Image (cartoon, rainbow, N blue to C red):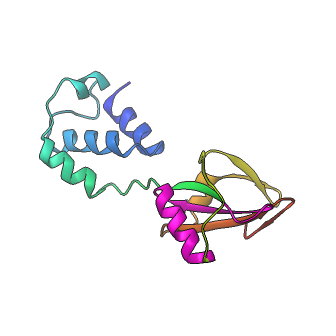
Amino acid sequence: MNVKEMLQDAIRYEEPFMSHYIYCLLQDGKVKLEDDVSRIFQVEINDEEFRQVYENDILGINKAKIFSLKLNKNQFAFVFAKTKQDAMMFFRSRFNRNPINCYEYDLDFGLLRGKEYVTFRSLRKEHDKFPALAFIYERNHAYGI
């Protein structure tokens, strides 16, 4: 595997640490896209530059996750947020109460929307600000999906 393939995978699978790490090495000319991936771990990185690039997320790799927050016995709000705490704060502001529980789901979890099969990862692309309400699920019914 070469550096280009590793970078593509890191971006595809939303791995911000590795994506920004490779980006910094490329910017500094310490690796080339055609180099073997092992080269990434053989060169020294500028820690301060990497920290700034990573913290500012200059590649725009979104790490919003999906959380299920229980409204009551039969209703669940699915919220895209960066952290569980953000999801719970969004829930409180939207529904004026605390959720009964809050669980993170895998973004690649699939579900049916009408007749089409979608994943939370694909649904997340429909939002540009986070936290965001994906939909409300009621046992045997789904609203907004």
In depth, the one of 75 and 66 nearer the eye is 75
- Quarter of image, res 106: top right
Report the quarter where the C terminus lies.
bottom right
In depth, the one of 55 and 7 nearer the eye is 55
Q: What residue appears at the point 43 percent right and 56 percent down from the top-left corner? A: 62
Q: Position of residue 55 (x, y in %)?
A: 26, 54
Q: What residue appears at the point 61 percent right and 68 percent down from the top-left corner? A: 133
Q: Position of residue 67 (x, y in %)?
A: 59, 55
- Quarter of image, res 4: top left
Q: What residue appears at the point 47 percent right and 63 percent down from the top-left corner? A: 86
In depth, the one of 69 and 98 nearer the eye is 98
Span highlighted in magenta in the image = 70-95
Residue 86 part of the magenta segment: yes
In depth, the one of 10 and 5 nearer the eye is 10
**Up/down of 133 relative to 57, above or below:** below
Q: Position of residue 66 (x, y in %)?
A: 58, 55
Looking at the image, residue 99 sits to the left or right of residue 26; the answer is right
Report the quarter where the N terminus lies.
top left
